[in-house]
Structures are given as structure tokens and as C-alpha cells.
Amino acid sequence: MTEAPVRRRPRAITGHVRTVEQVTPHMVRIVFGGPELDGLAAGAFSDEYVKLLFAPSGVTYPEPFDLGVIRETLPRESWPTTRTYTVRRWDPANAELTIDLVTHGDEGLAGPWAMRARPGDPVRFSGPGGAYLPDPTADWHLLAGDESALPAIAASLERLAPGAKAYAFVEVSDPAEEQKVDSPGDVELRWLHRGDRKPGELLVPAVTEFEFPAGRVHVFVHGEATFVKDLRRLLFIDRGVPRAGQSISGYWRLGHDEDRWQSTKREWNQSVEREQDAS
């Protein structure tokens, strides 16, 4: 007799806000911690992410918060809405997780929450997940993205091997959105100020015109899906970068909220691969 597979119930962690910092005009840094973060399996990668959980308006959940129970007992419209954010820093000694959130006034869900967050507020999340860490055996590193990828790019530059050569291209709206990034590596960081242009309009030409050094490159390219598609073609088709081991993916797509993007992301990625494989 074959036993039925055991279904693993999704686990959520509850922490509490410890500090809130306005890093730039459109970037808020939130540090949260608490007993449930003790021993969190974080820190293996520099692109780790968590999924913040937000209750729909007017919905309250029984305590203790249990995501599995919620999904088993409440209608889908009462389930938490998720928003994904990169872990900017993990401090295991103090069990504190830092995330940076891009804000656009009252637009969106997580941004307005971040602007209103105060010490002591609960933070519920699942994760972390992740897959990328700068390869210490690579001859050089290329990192490119918009402000949504900046936390991961900064975290990755901080974790380079001493003296490792890296070139980073970061597109933000204006000079006020630049951040100081420290690294033990030999880093050339180029900031691109987009202004009113669409995401990627400066980033794609900058990476296209960049003269690649010799040797094996390890790539990290993330941000708005359309320019990521263009850079994927540049790297894999035009420049012949081997695909294995590279980290290239759209974090978001212009005109889509996260729910819509996540529901179409797999199809989008498959269509991109088919199109570029046919080139």
C-alpha cells in the first residue's frame, strides 16, 4: 500500500519592526527581529528574498498566526497578499533582518506600509529563498539592475572576495537615489540617472557599450522584465556568455502589480527563451 504524500504546510514567521530609516527619497530601510527569527536559515546567498504578508483590508487573523490554518479555513479572498523583497542584510547575532523597499507615495501596498511603519509593528513573512552568490572563482563580475535590484547588488558587492574585479551598473531616477556601497572587491560602480525615461533606457545602452574584459564572467542582472530580456539577449546571444550559473530574471514588469506579474512570469520567461533560442 502506497502512503499518501505528506503535505507541508506553509510556514510564516512573525517579527517586529526595530528601526525605520529613510535611506533615499524613495528607499526605506526596515530592520525587524524577534524570537521567531532566531536560527533563521538566512545568509547563504546575497540575493535572498522574503515574502511579506499583508492582510486584506478589514481582515484579522487568529493568533498565533498560522498561514497553513488560514489557507485551510478562510476563503481565498481573505488570504494574505504577498510582496517580495530582497534581504539587504542578515545579522544572525541579533536575529535581525534588513530589507530595503522602494516607495512611490501612496502607490502600491508595501511602499505605503513601509512609510507608515514604526518600531514595534508586527511583520509577517515567509522565506527566505535565494540562489546567487558571487563566484569567487570567476575572473570578473557584471551586475546590472534598477532600484528594485539595488539591495541585492549592494549585498553582493559587499560579499565579493577581496580584490575581486566587478563592474556594476545601477539605474535610478536621479542622483538623490544613489547609495554608498562598500566592498572588499575592486568595484567600478556606475550610476545611471533615468529621469522620466522608462526603466532600462539608459541601462541597456550602457551595458551594450561596455567593453568586456577577458576571462570568465559571473553575471547578475535583475529588474524590470523588458530590459532584463534585452540584456539577456545581449549577454547570451550577442556576447556569447555561457548560460550556466548566471542569474538573470525580471523582478517586476512595467504595468503589472506583483500578483499579475507572478501569474504570468513563467509564461513570459518561456516565451523569451523560445524567441532567443530561435535567434
Image (tube, helix red, strand yellow):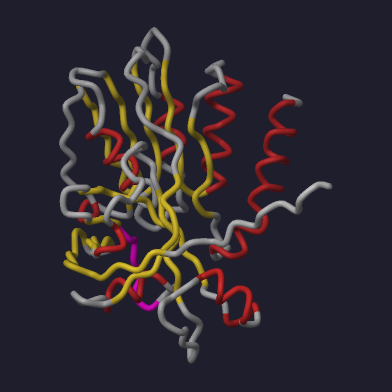
Give yes or no for residue 104 being in the magenta stretch. yes
Which quadrant holds residue 195?
bottom left
Q: In which quadrant of the rendered image does the C terminus lie?
A: top right
**Would you place residue 184 above or below residue 87 in this image?**
above
Report the side of 198 relative to 96 (left or right). right
- The image position of residue 135, as x and y in percent, is 37, 22
**Would you place residue 183 above or below residue 29 in this image?**
above
- The image position of residue 159, as x and y in percent, is 25, 31
- The image position of residue 68, as x and y in percent, is 56, 69
The number of numbered badges drawn on the structure is 0
Q: Residue at x 30, y 35 (%)?
A: 156
> Furthest-top residue in view?
214
Q: Which residues are magenta?
A: 100-106
Report the side of 163 relative to 41 (left or right). left
- The image position of residue 176, as x and y in percent, is 20, 55
Please name whichever residue, 265 or 172, is drawn nearer the observer in this view of the structure.
Answer: 265
Please name whichever residue, 157 or 136, is drawn nearer the observer in this view of the structure.
Answer: 136
Which quadrant holds residue 190?
top left
Q: Residue at x 56, y 74 (%)?
A: 69
Please name whichever residue, 219 or 176, is drawn nearer the observer in this view of the structure.
Answer: 219
Which quadrant holds residue 188?
top left
> Furthest-bottom residue in view?
58
**Would you place residue 132 above or below residue 128 in this image?**
above
Q: Residue at x 29, y 57 (%)?
A: 99
Give yes or no for residue 78 being in the magenta stretch. no
> Furthest-right residue in view?
1
